């Protein structure tokens, strides 16, 4: 068994990543490791005023970030588990200690053989599913680009149109000089331009997930089986 990320990328591409990134994205049931990153986001930004209602609605279900800030303490929890449908799942729960109270941006990821990519379920109820395509850059960093988005609620299963959808690009690298991971996230809309993003750095600690388990409140409230 390999991690869902190595499976999606393939061995050759995965092994072009920096060794520290290889370890971070080997978190899974096979490795038995979980990873917690802690650091600071230098900047959390928004696009123009027209996008703020969109961000506020997403924030109700821990999707997107409705606030901005600088030098914001940050944590990310990557914990593998088997979901109620028997799929290996890894949490990507990000917590931003913003003024006025913390904000979370939740995601859970599985490998989708049908779609040949990592499937990213966003939010507390997995209403939004996004295809993620991952590649190794020449410098050993990881580039993640989102593809098609789908909205699911009860019998409803629709492709999110580009008019309201966002295209995400995530770049993660390891800075050997500082011993920190660096991350830069940007989400754009084809018609409205930049929506939001953040950039900063963090350190990572690893632990045995079999002894730690998945803490309360980390898993989504509702799980979606449709890929």
Image: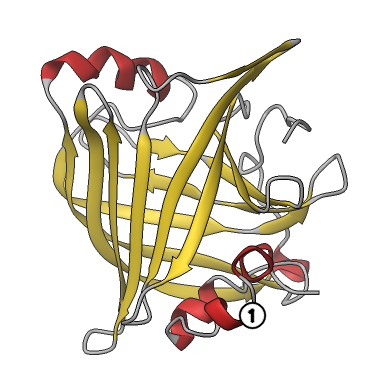
Q: Is residue 112 above or below residue 85?
A: below
Left or right, 58 with reference to 206: left
Residue located 50% across and 65% down the image: 36
Q: Residues within 10 Å of mark 1 (few under 14, many from 20)?
A: few
Quadrant containing the C terminus in the rendered view: top right
Left or right, 199 with reference to 21: left
Residue located 34% across and 37% down the image: 102
Across and down, in percent, residue 209 comes to: 71, 67
Q: Decide which of 59, 192 is in the foreground and name it.
A: 192
Across and down, in percent, residue 142 comes to: 41, 69
Determine which residue is flagged by label 1: 11
Across and down, in percent, residue 24 comes to: 52, 73
Q: Decide which of 88, 180 is in the foreground and name it.
A: 88
> Which color mode does the image show?
secondary structure
Quadrant containing the N terminus in the rendered view: bottom right
Residue located 37% across and 63% down the image: 38
Q: How many marks?
A: 1
Tag 1's secondary structure?
helix
Residue located 75% across and 55% down the image: 81
Q: Is residue 200 above or below residue 70?
A: below
Q: Residue 9's quadrant in the figure? A: bottom right
Q: Decide which of 140, 21 is in the foreground and name it.
A: 140
Across and down, in percent, residue 182 comes to: 28, 68
Q: Residue 60's quadrant in the figure? A: top left
Q: Residue 85's quadrant in the figure? A: top right
Q: Is residue 58 above or below residue 109?
A: above
């Amino acid at each position: 068994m390999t991690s869902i990320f190595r499976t999606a990328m393939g061995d050759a591409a995965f092994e072009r990543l920096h060794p520290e990134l290889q370890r971070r994205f080997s978190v899974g049931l096979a490795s038995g490791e979980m990873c917690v990153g802690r650091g600071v986001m230098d900047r959390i930004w928004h696009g123009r005023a027209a996008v703020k209602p969109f961000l506020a609605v997403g924030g109700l279900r821990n999707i997107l970030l409705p606030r901005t800030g600088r030098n914001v303490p940050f944590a990310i929890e990557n914990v593998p588990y088997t979901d109620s449908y028997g799929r290996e799942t890894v949490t990507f729960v990000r917590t931003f200690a913003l003024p006025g109270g913390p904000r979370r941006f939740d995601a859970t990821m599985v490998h989708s053989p049908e779609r040949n990519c990592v499937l990213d379920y966003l939010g507390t109820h997995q209403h939004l599913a996004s295809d993620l395509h991952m590649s190794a850059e020449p410098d050993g960093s990881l580039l993640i680009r989102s593809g098609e988005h789908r909205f699911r609620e009860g019998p409803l299963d629709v492709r999110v149109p580009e008019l309201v959808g966002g295209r995400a690009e995530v770049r993660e690298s390891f800075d050997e000089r500082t011993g920190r991971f660096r991350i830069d996230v940007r989400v754009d809309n084809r018609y409205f331009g930049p929506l939001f993003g953040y950039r900063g750095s963090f350190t990572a600690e690893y632990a045995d997930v079999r002894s730690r388990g998945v803490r309360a409140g980390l898993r989504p409230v509702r799980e979606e089986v449709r890929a």
